[in-house]
Amino acid sequence: MKRHTARNIWHLGIKELRSLWSDKIMLGLILFMFTVGIYVAAGAQSRELHNAPIAFVDNDRSPLSERIIDAFYPPHFKHPEHISQQEIDPGMDEGLYTFVLVIPPEFQHDVLAGKLPEIQVNVDATRMTQAFIGSSYISSIINGEVLEFVRGYRTSTPLPIDLAVKVRFNPNLNGIWFGSVMEIMTNITILSIILTGAALIRERERGTIEHLLVMPLTPLEIMGAKVWANGIVVLASAMLSLFLVVKGLFQVPIAGSITLFMIGAMLHLFSTTSIGIFLGTIARSMPQFGLLIILVILPMQLLSGGVTPRESMPEIVQNIMLISPTTHFVNFSKAIMYRGAGISVVWKQFAVISLIGTVFFLIALTRFRKTVAQTQL
């Protein structure tokens, strides 16, 4: 690259930063997405069971039944309530309880006799998330308490083999650890596309694109300036959010190198900012650009593996999404941030996303040159 070309890209990028600084709405959007947006997505909508209302109908009144009831406590469940059989239907109809467990008479006696008594679990499935997660919680808690109780009475009786489950990378299965980092990845993609595309459309609507065209500037210089200027804003915002919100507010441990993650994010931004410029050349107005954003970002995010594991998708979808930079970004970001992977593990994905970024950049540059040529006619 010639020296004057690099200088032009630098000065045009500074102009882009000044233009963005004067756009208070866009600055507010960046601030919101990397602060409140992260908190809402990761904290307020945590995937764990939290304060689920539960009640018991204890028809046994035995030490075992009391032990089971005492095993349910905050923060996963509210303090259990003791109710009668007649209160089950009215209470669930009014939404007072998500779970109502009915312990049958002679429950402890049947357990010690080697029988298989049943505990009835009534679930309010209108609270879908709590119902799905809570049922597995209840089963695990009751099985554990019964096993410990029986072990105290049958020390000589061999017990069934237990699975020794060891959870790696997130031992407490805390959804905040996962959600907050994934939300940063999502915001990097969304904002980089929005900022670059909106910057190009803003130039066209204000008529400043014609001012640039009468200068001794090439489309490569104009596009390169928008890529680095908007990319550096997104990267800096993501880094601040990672330190202040994720590590500071949520106390999420980061297993790998943040520097390596940022290098990967830069390669990803090379692709997504190019996509934003490409969409900006297609859309003729900001409303059209907004509709295109929906059509492009939703598939990129939902099928990248950040929301649903790629292994759960049809094979043809997995293969198609290999051309999307978000797929590789999510893969190596998970490896770095959660599993502490180094460059020896992620270098292939870095190479692939660099290739994808180059292709998208060349496609966007070709389209931008055609748009400039049409403007000059």
Image (spheres, rainbow, N blue to C red):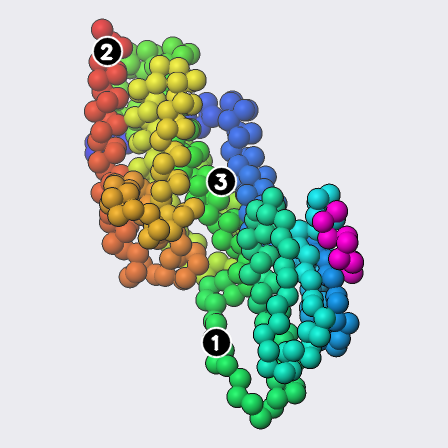
Q: Which residue is mark 3?
A: 237
Q: Is residue 251 visible?
A: no
Figure quadrant of the N terminus: top left
Q: Which residue is mark 1?
A: 164
Using a 10 Å C-alpha cutoff, classify the residue at mark 1 as few (fewer than 14 neighbours), some (14 to 19) or many (20 or more).
Answer: few
Identify whether 66 is placed above or below 172.
below
Q: Nearer the viewer, residue 218 or 97?
A: 97
Q: Nearer the viewer, residue 24 or 98?
A: 98
Q: Which residue is mark 2?
A: 374
Magenta range is 80-90
Give the distance between the C-alpha atoms of the residues marked 2 and 3, in whole angstroms: 35 Å
| Secondary element type, mark 2 | helix
Magenta stretch: residue 81 in it? Answer: yes
Q: Disc number at residue 332?
A: none
Give the distance between the C-alpha atoms of the residues marked 1 and 3, in whole angstroms: 42 Å
| Amino acid at circle 2 | Gln
Figure quadrant of the C terminus: top left
Using a 10 Å C-alpha cutoff, classify the residue at mark 3 as few (fewer than 14 neighbours), some (14 to 19) or many (20 or more).
Answer: some
Using a 10 Å C-alpha cutoff, classify the residue at mark 2 as few (fewer than 14 neighbours), some (14 to 19) or many (20 or more).
Answer: few
Give the quadrant of residue 134: bottom right
Residue at 49%, 40% in the rendered image: 237
Q: Is residue 230 left or right of residue 68?
A: left
Residue at 40%, 34% in the rendered image: 298
| Amino acid at circle 3 | Ser
- The percent coordinates of residue 18 (x first, y second) are 46, 25
Q: Nearer the viewer, residue 105 or 269?
A: 105
| Secondary element type, mark 3 | helix
Which mark is nearer the camera, 2 or 1?
A: 1
